[in-house]
Image (cartoon, rainbow, N blue to C red):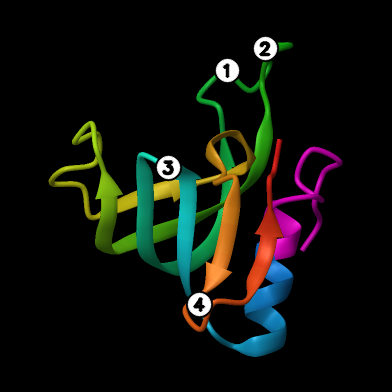
Amino acid sequence: MYFTEKEKSNMAVLFSEISNTKKNDFIFFYSDDLIFSVKVENFFDSDNDEDFDSENYEEYNACVVQIKQILVDKNNKFKGIELFELNYRNFPRKIKTEDGRIILKEFV
């Protein structure tokens, strides 16, 4: 799978972890107010919904994330949401495996 420069510090790390360990259950930390237990599903190509011929068109890697449990959501932002598309634009700031090993920390 090819990763752009924007994706090498985030999506590529997650893809590599899943490829190497065959485990896809994680804890995603977006902030102190938003923490999920998730299962990462299929990786696929996605885009920003711009016209293909537009200079703003962008294609990138994404994956389906199933929210197994909302651990913290102080603003009820994800209440009722079971699946979402993850890409480099909405990547969590920290990811841990279910056994507590940090695979990505403080993505900016």
Q: Which residue is mark 2?
A: 54
Is 37 drawn above or below residue 87 in the view shown?
below
Q: Which residue is mark 1?
A: 51
The alpha-carbon separation of the residues under discs 2 and 4 comes to 35 Å
The alpha-carbon separation of the residues under discs 2 and 3 comes to 37 Å
Tag 2 near tag 1, CB within 8 Å: yes
Q: Residue at x 72, y 85 (%)?
A: 20
Looking at numbered disc 1 in the image, what kind of residue is underneath it?
Asp
Q: For residue 86: magenta? A: no
Q: Residue at x 57, y 60 (%)?
A: 95
Q: Could you tell me which secondary element the residue under label 2 belongs to?
A: loop
Question: In the rendering, at what x and y percent does residue 73 appear?
Answer: 26, 43
**Side of 100 relative to 77 (left or right):** right
Tag 2 near tag 4, CB within 8 Å: no
Q: Residue at x 50, y 24 (%)?
A: 49
The alpha-carbon separation of the residues under discs 3 and 4 comes to 22 Å
Stretch in magenta: 1-13
Q: Residue at x 57, y 44 (%)?
A: 91
Quadrant location of residue 23? bottom right
